[in-house]
Amino acid sequence: MSRVKRGQYPRRRHKRVLAQTKGFFGGRKNRYRQAMRVLWKSWQYAYVGRKLRKRDFRRLWITRINAACRLNGTSYSRLMFSLKKAGVELDRKVLADMAATDAAAFKQLAELAARAR
């Protein structure tokens, strides 16, 4: 009686999983059952991480804008309110980039916002 070797499809599936867990520690990288567990967990972390990245970047932009505001004698909340009132529709990403790279343009924006208030 010969043993059952299961064929090519499970092997392909196992190889694909083990390729994805390459670089993991210990048996997590070369034992299929363990690799499947940690691979699923890694997908969960990746999903959550994609959501957190948006939150983290928004916090970073707000911090940069606030720092530039303080240099120009105002606060973040006052600037954002005044810009909205003045009809300036720049998002936080653009404002943060402007604050970091082009201080003169940001100063002009802050002055425009101060006039609108």
Image (cartoon, grey):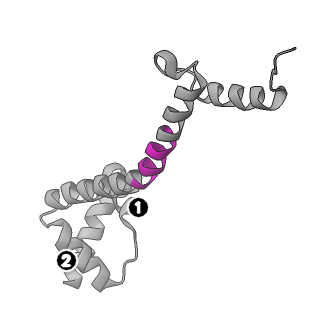
What residue sits right under mark 2 in the picture? Answer: 114
14 sits to left or right of 21? right
Q: Which residues are magenta?
A: 42-51
Alpha carbon distance from label 2 to label 1: 19 Å
Residue drawn at point x = 52 percent, y = 27 percent:
34
Residue occupied by mark 1: 94
User: Which comes before the other along the chain, label 2 or label 1?
Assistant: 1
Badge 1: residue crowd in 10 Å (few <14, some 14–19, many ≥20) = few
Q: Which mark is residue 8?
A: none
Q: Quadrant of the C terminus?
A: bottom left
Horizontal and vertical percent position of residue 70:
14, 59
Q: Position of residue 65 (x, y in %)?
A: 26, 59
| Vertical arrangement, residue 54 with respect to residue 112, above or below | above
Confirm whether residue 31 shows in the render.
yes
Camera-nearest label, 2 or 1: 1
Residue 98 in magenta stretch: no
Residue at the spot 82% in from the left edge and 16% down from the top edge: 3
Image-quadrant location for residue 66: bottom left
Answer left or right for 22 relative to 44. right
- In which quadrant of the rendered view does residue 103 lie? bottom left
**Amino acid type of the residue tagged 1 in the rendering:** Val
- 79 left or right of 9 in image: left
Which of the two residues, 55 or 70, is positioned nearer the viewer here?
55
What kind of element bears circle 2?
helix
Q: Position of residue 57 (x, y in %)?
A: 36, 53
